[in-house]
Every structure is written in structure tokens, then in C-alpha cells.
Image (cartoon, grey):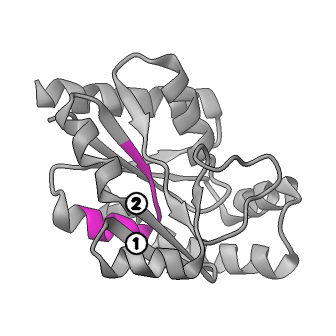
Amino acid sequence: MAPLIIVSGPSGCGKSTIIHRLLNEQHVPLRLSVSVTTRKPRPGEQAGVDYHYWSVPEFEKAKDAGRFLEWAQAHTNYYGTLEDDVGPWRAKGVGVVLDIDVQGWEQVMRRCPDAVSVFVRTTSLATLETRLRGRATESEDAIQRRLQTAQIELARADAYDHQIVNDELETAIAEVRTIIASAFAAKQ
């Protein structure tokens, strides 16, 4: 069974950038599980690539049917990982990366204790706020909600297997690459 890698961190910490860079390198058989969300796509996002965009009733029906490995409600929307987007790939020898929040991490770790967890952060909330504002995709209220959530998430960071400070992107990518390589080596 290939490894399951959980990557969490506050919005704006750079986790998606790190993940996509590593997926493009193809050093090991690795794929990103595409999460389901009920939020609307941001400019430039593609259905089936960035997220599966579902209605609230669609999400709730799948949740009630037990189709999610994990799910959470965050920032007024649902997010979740479909079980059938993880297990079959791992069984084929392909590592699966989950880009999920702390609530999701807790659920997955209960069900998949062999998962490797990585928390990505910046050195300060001020750096995080600068990044969120630099996106220019969210209202002031949304930015403030994300910063409040970040404080809650940062309080849980010590419970993860690894913490990566992403103040220098290339260094952060190298550190996560090493963690993933070690996870594959441990599964052989």
C-alpha cells in the first residue's frame, strides 16, 4: 500500500504551491486527491482539477451515504475527500496527497493511522495576512475569518508528524520532498 500524505496549513501558507510543484516533479508515483467543495470556483480554477464543485444537497447526500474519508464545514462551505479517490490508488502503489484542514486531518488520522502528516506554516500571522491580501480574491470579512481560523489551526500544528515553515519556497519544497521520499521508503 502506497503512502497517504496529509498536508495542512492555514490559507495562504503556500501548501497548494508546494504540492503542485512536487506533483510535477514525478520523483515517485504520487497524485493529489481532488477534494469536493460546495464553494464557488475562484477565477482560474477548474472543476475536477482544483476541486469537484458540488451543491450542498449533493454533498449532504454523499456524506449521509458514508462516501467521504473526511469532511468538514469551513468558511461557510463544505469540503471533503471521497474514499474512492484514495484507497484504490494507494492499493495500486500510487501515493495520495490530501490537501485538507485540521478537522479533516483529525478524521483521516483516526481512520488511517499510517498516514504521514505535514503542517505548512509561515513564521508569522503578518506574513500570512500579506499573502492572503496579495491574492486579491477575497473580501475583508473572508480574510479576517481565514486569519481567525489560522490561529486555531496553528494551535494544532505540534500534533502533526512534521512542520514546515514556508518563508522560502524552494527550501520548503525540498523538506516536503524528503518527507515524501521517506514515506515511500518506509512502505517498501
Q: Can residue 61 be seen in this view?
A: yes
Q: Label 2 crowding class (10 Å Cα cut-off): few <14, some 14-19, many 20+?
A: many
N-term-proximal mark, 1 vs 2: 1
Q: Name the residue located 50 percent from the left edge and 27 percent from the top edge.
A: 22
Please report the residue visible at 52 percent of the width from the left and 58 percent of the height from the top: 9
Q: What stretch is highlighted in magenta?
A: 97-108
Is residue 158 rendered to the left or right of residue 45? Answer: left
Location of residue 91 with respect to 82 vertically, above or below: above
- In the image as oriented, which residue stretches furthest toward the left? 188
Q: Which amino acid does label 1 sit on?
A: Trp
Residue 81: assigned label: 2
- What's under tag 2, amino acid-wise? Thr
Whole-percent x and y of residue 76? 63, 83
Residue 79 x, y percent position in the rendering: 51, 69
Specify the quadrant that holds the C terminus: top left
CA gap, disc 1 and disc 2? 6 Å
Task: Report the front residue among 169 and 48.
Answer: 48
Q: Are marks 1 and 2 in contact (CB under 8 Å)?
A: yes
* Label 2: element kind: strand
| Residue name at image x 81 percent, y 82 percent | 141
